[in-house]
Amino acid sequence: MNRIGLGAVMVVILGVQGCLLGPEYQQPDLNMPENWNNMTLEGKSSRLAITVGNVPEADWWRAFGNDELNTLIEEALDRNHDLRQAGFRVLEARAIAYGSGAGLYPNLSVDGAYSRIRRSETILVAPTGGAPQGFAPPGANFDIWSAAIDLRWELDLWGRIRRGKEAFSAEALASEMNRRGILLSLVSEVGHTYFRLRELDEQVEIAERNLALQQDSLSIIQARAQAGLVSDLDVKREEALVAETASQIPEFRRQRAVQLHQLEVLTGANPGTRVLSTKPLRSVVVQPTIPVGLPSDLLQRRPDILEKEETLKAANARIGEARAYFFPSVAITGNGGFQTSEFSQWFNWASRNMTIGPSVTLPIFEGYTNLARLEVAENRYQQMLEDYQQTILNAFREVADILVALQTREEQLASQRQQVAASRESLELADIRYRKGLVSYIDVLDAQRLVLSAELGVVQTERARLTDMVSLFKAVGGGWSNEQLPQVIHENP
C-alpha cells in the first residue's frame, strides 16, 4: 500500500473512531415522597427539634455537644482499620480505572537481538520459519544484528475500550461511596456504643442506690424481727430482694467492659488500654437539632444509594462494551528499525527496514459467545436497576421509621417519668401502711422492685432516644468533607 492509500485509510478510520455503541445512562424515574412531614407525628411533642429541608453538617456528631464523644469519633476516623482498608480499596479501584484506558493509545515496544546463524548445506531454498537467512548460500555462517520498534494500536471504532473505561470509572466511584458508607457507619457505631456505655454507668448507679435503700430496709426488718414485731419470712423476702438487686450490678459492669472494648477496637486501640471514667447518661443527654433534608437529598447524600447508582452506571456501560464485540476490530500494526549481518553497518541508514498497515478482524462464528455476553450484560443491568430502586425504598423506610420512633420515644419517656414518680410515692405509702400493719411486706417488696425497674427503664429509653438520633443522622446521609478522606484521589480518573 502506497503512502497516499495508507493515509486515506487512516483518515477514514480516525473519522469514525468517535462512535459509541450502547445506551447512554439516564437516571431511572423514581417515585419519591413529597414531604417527610407526613411521616412524623406532628404536634405530639415540643422537645424534639427536627429541621426539615436542611442537611447535616460534615461533623454532625458535634451537635451532641460532648467533647469526649467528639474525641472518640476523631480517633476512629484516623485509626480504624476497616476504614483505612476501604481507603486502599478506593485507590485500587481508581488505579484499575486509570489503567483501563491504556488501550486507547498506541502500544510501542523496543526490541534488540543478536543471532549467530549457520545455514544447512543440504537445503537449496530459504526456510519459511525461524531466523532470517537472507541470500546466504547453503553451509554459510553469518550474524544478524537487529533493533526495532514494534507498534500496535487497536482503534476503538465502536467504543468497546471507552465503554470499559466508563464502567471501571463508575465502579471506582462506587468504591469511594462504599468507603463513605463505612465512614458513616463507623461514626454511628461509635455513638451507639458510647451512649450504651453511659447508660450502663447510670444503671450501675441506680442499682447501687436502690441496693443501699434495700439494705437499710433489711436492717430495719431484721431489728423488728429480733423484737418479735415481724416474722422471719419478711426478713428472708427482703434478703432475696437485696441479693436480686446486687446480682444485677456485676452484670451491668461486665456489659460496660464489653462496650469499652468495642470502643477501643473502633478507635484502633488494643482492648484494655483505654480508661473512661464513670459518667451517668443524664450528664451527656443533649437535644440536638436534627436537619432531615428533603427526600431528594437522600439520592445525593446517602452513600449506599450513590454506590448503587454508580454500579448501575457501570452495568449500563457494560452493555455497550458487549455490543462492540459484534463488530470488526481494526488495529494498526507496524515494525521498523535496523537489521544487518555486519555489526559496523548496524545503525547505517541503508540497514533500515519497516512494515506498517491496518489489520481487520471480523467475528463470524464464536459459538454464541458474543450473544451470551450481551445477554449477561443486559440482565445484569436489570438486576442493578432493581437493587438501586430497592435501596431507595429501604432508605425512605428507614428515615420514616426513625422519625416516628423519635416522636414516640418522647411520649414513652414522659409516661416512664410519671411511672418513676408514682412508683416512688407508692413505695413510701406501702412502707407507711406496712408499719401500721395495714398491708403485708409483699406490698413493700413489690413497690421496691417497681421503683428499680421504672428507673432503669427511663435510662434505657433515654439511651434509645439518643441512638435513634444518631441513626437518623446516618439515615439522612450524615455528612463528610474532603479532609476526612485523605487517602482518596478525588479527581475523576
Image: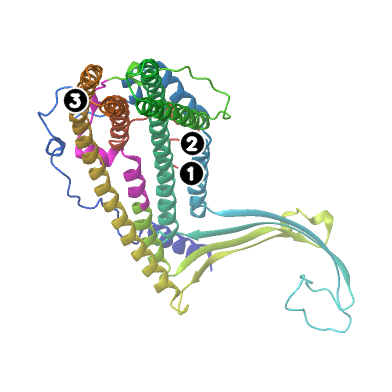
Is 297 covered by the magenta stretch? yes
Q: Earlier in the sequence, mark 1 or mark 2?
A: 2
Circle 2 residue: 83
Q: How many marks?
A: 3
Circle 1 residue: 94
Residue at (42% x, 72% y) in the render: 370
Label 3 secondary element? helix
* Quarter of the figure with residue 55: top left
Report the magenta residues as a range.
287-311
**Marks 1 and 3, how far apart in space?**
52 Å
Q: Earlier in the sequence, mark 3 or mark 2?
A: 2
Label 1 or label 2, whichever lies nearer to me, is: 2
**Marks 3 and 2, how far apart in space?**
39 Å
Residue at (49% x, 24% y) in the render: 75
**Is residue 5 shown above or below 465?**
below
Q: Nearer the viewer, residue 31 or 42?
A: 42
Q: Nearer the viewer, residue 40 or 151?
A: 40
Circle number at residue 256: none
Is 303 covered by the magenta stretch? yes
Label 1 secondary element? helix
Residue type at the position of mark 2: Leu
> Taking 467 as reference, is 413 left or right?
left
Residue at (28% x, 39% y) in the render: 300
Q: Nearer the viewer, residue 147 or 296?
A: 296
Label 2 secondary element? helix
The reply to whether callout 1 and callout 3 are in contact (CB within 8 Å) is: no
Circle 3 residue: 414
Residue type at the position of mark 1: Arg
The percent coordinates of residue 235 (x first, y second) are 38, 24
The reply to whether callout 3 and callout 2 are in contact (CB within 8 Å) is: no
Near mark 2 (Cα within 10 A), the count class, few <14, some 14-19 or many ≥20, is many
Residue type at the position of mark 3: Ala
